[in-house]
């Protein structure tokens, strides 16, 4: 285990710590550079815990998340990033879309 | 679930628009594009941003208006007034401000000879001033651009004395949306797509709901056709002097994705923050290149804007700005991010069509657009355009 970055009850998510990305552009790049197996494994692990994770996060004001909650929050944003790949497209990319880099997020 | 079943309803309401094919040469003709610079973009109010971007004295942003061959400095003065100026030094016309956004701390200094201007655009400093002949600094401020604000949206007009004031120009759109609580939402996401498409091709492609079940068959399968195979037609259309709005209802028969259902559960917000909506989804086209999209949400409505910035006859920038009510909880924020993510997938699919349409139009295999009744707003847009261009002669009737 790479160390206790996440609250104890969510430490089963530690193998997915490289999905803790704060920027949308980073999460998009991560999705596009991952295999469907990697995406599916992350989705399958975090999805059943989402209600518990959000209940934990909602104890705190969103702009004052304590240490440990911040990476957990980033993981939930990464679920948002991959959900369409898993539930709709069955591939990391949108099926018929422009090259992702051309849809530029200004951050 | 309500949908319009009467056929060709809008043509009956707006018979003056006719029902025939609409010429598409305006989307591919370089000569037409050159005339649009003068006759459309220098004669209309152009949205350049929102006041939220420059809340404090001295805050500014630059807005490149390639179609008008200029760049506008939009700045809040130390007196709190928002002004627009050409970003051009009075000395020898060098580019004055270089940072896209920032705060003027005292003065801007031109990189060429350090002529200095304050946040009100006044010329305050000239190095070696005594060596100039008859220099009147008070007359050499930055060149102002007509600027006005409606509901926090900043507009400029390249005419120093526009025929219509901003609210008069906005007409029915202002009547519908004024007091709309736009200021209770904040900019959460901005996207820019540089496209190989005429600005009108991109706008027209967004300006209808007929394409939704087909172009978005992957991102929203089954969402836009009802169970008895009726199409989800427009629930409302209002055509104004220069502008238009159309609306749809949501398809309550469609099944949410697992994450969609989850997000509805996670979002426990009780803010009930509403926009003045006509349907569940409203699409306001503010001529020539600005769109306000309003989305009904379970607890909060949100809005987006599009600006289609022409670069050349076959190139434009599609700028997308997303505004949500400030999220109070992680669950609310996640559900906003999820909704935005789904919409962005749709827009990335749309962008494909913008470019393949342009290729097809450029081939001149076809010379006209065939428009159905639920595309009447495209018909109206091209009529307004032709009116500005001085070309409207009843074609399409």
Image (cartoon, grey):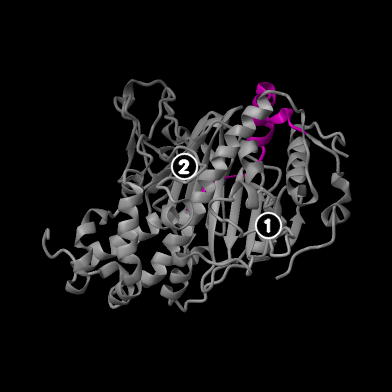
* Residue B330 image offset from top left, x and y in percent: 35, 70
Quick one: SS at disc 1?
A: helix
Q: Residue at x 63, y 61 (%)?
A: B281
Q: Position of residue B177 (x, y in %)?
A: 63, 62
Q: Which residues are magenta?
A: B23-50
- Whether the residues at callouts 2 and 1 have beta carbons within 8 Å, the answer is no
The total of numbered circles placed on residues is 2
Residue extending farthest to the front is: A37
Residue B173 image label? 1
Which of A20 and B30 lies nearest the eye of the viewer? Answer: A20
Residue B197 is situated, as x and y percent measured from the top left of the image, at: 59, 32
**Left or right of residue B189: residue B384:** right
Q: Is residue B42 visible?
A: no
Residue B79, position as x, y percentages in the image: 42, 54
* Residue receiving disc 2: B192
Cα distance in 3D space between marks 2 and 1: 25 Å
Q: Indicate whether B311 appears above or below B103.
A: above
What residue is shown at x 33% (from left), y 63% (from top)?
A44
Residue A94, compared with residue B108, is above or below; it is below
Locate residue A50 relative to residue A100 in the image: left or right. left
Q: Is residue B5 above or below residue B217?
A: below
Label 2: state its secondary structure: strand
């Amino acid at each position: 285990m790479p160390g206790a970055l996440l609250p104890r009850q969510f430490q089963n998510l530690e193998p997915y710590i490289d999905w803790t990305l704060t920027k949308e552009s980073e999460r998009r790049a991560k999705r596009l550079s991952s295999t469907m197996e990697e995406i599916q494994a992350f989705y399958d692990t975090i999805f059943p815990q989402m209600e518990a994770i959000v209940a934990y996060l909602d104890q705190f004001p969103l702009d004052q998340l304590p240490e440990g909650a911040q990476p957990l929050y980033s993981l939930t944003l990464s679920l948002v990033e991959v959900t369409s790949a898993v539930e709709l497209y069955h591939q990391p990319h949108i099926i018929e879309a422009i090259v992702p880099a051309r849809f530029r997020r200004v951050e | 679930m309500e949908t319009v079943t009467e056929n060709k309803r809008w043509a009956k309401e707006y018979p003056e628009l006719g029902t025939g094919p609409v010429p598409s040469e305006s989307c591919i003709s370089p000569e037409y594009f050159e005339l649009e610079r003068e006759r459309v973009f220098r004669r209309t109010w152009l949205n350049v941003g929102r006041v939220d971007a420059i809340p404090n004295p001295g805050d500014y942003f630059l807005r490149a208006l390639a179609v008008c061959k200029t760049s506008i400095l939009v700045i809040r003065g130390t007196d709190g007034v928002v002004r627009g100026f050409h970003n051009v030094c009075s000395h020898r016309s060098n580019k004055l401000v270089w940072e896209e956004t920032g705060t003027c701390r005292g003065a801007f200094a031109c990189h060429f000879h350090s002529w200095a201007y304050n946040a009100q655009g006044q010329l305050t400093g000239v190095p070696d001033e005594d060596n100039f002949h008859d220099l009147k600094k008070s007359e050499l401020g930055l060149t102002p651009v007509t600027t006005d604000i409606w509901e926090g949206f900043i507009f400029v007009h390249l005419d120093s004395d526009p025929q219509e004031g901003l609210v008069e120009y906005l007409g029915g759109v202002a009547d519908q949306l004024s007091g709309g609580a736009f200021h209770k939402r904040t900019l959460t996401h901005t996207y820019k797509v540089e496209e190989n498409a005429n600005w009108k091709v991109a706008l027209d492609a967004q300006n209808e709901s007929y394409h939704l079940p087909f172009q978005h068959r992957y991102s929203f399968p089954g969402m836009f056709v009802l169970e008895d195979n009726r199409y989800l037609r427009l629930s409302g259309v209002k055509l104004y002097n220069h502008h238009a709005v159309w609306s749809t209802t949501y398809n309550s028969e469609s099944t949410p994705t697992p994450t969609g259902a989850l997000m509805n559960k996670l979002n426990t917000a009780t803010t009930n923050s509403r926009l003045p909506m006509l349907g569940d989804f409203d699409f306001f086209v503010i001529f020539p290149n600005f769109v306000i999209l309003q989305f009904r949400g379970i607890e909060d409505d949100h809005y987006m804007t599009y600006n289609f910035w022409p670069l050349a006859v076959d190139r434009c920038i599609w700028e997308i700005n997303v505004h949500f009510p400030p999220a109070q909880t992680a669950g609310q924020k996640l559900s906003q991010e999820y909704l935005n993510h789904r919409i962005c997938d749709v827009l990335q699919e749309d962008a494909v069509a913008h470019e393949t349409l342009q290729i097809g139009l450029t081939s001149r295999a076809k010379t006209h657009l065939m428009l159905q009744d639920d595309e009447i707003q495209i018909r109206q847009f091209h009529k307004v355009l032709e009116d500005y261009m001085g070309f409207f002669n009843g074609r399409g009737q």
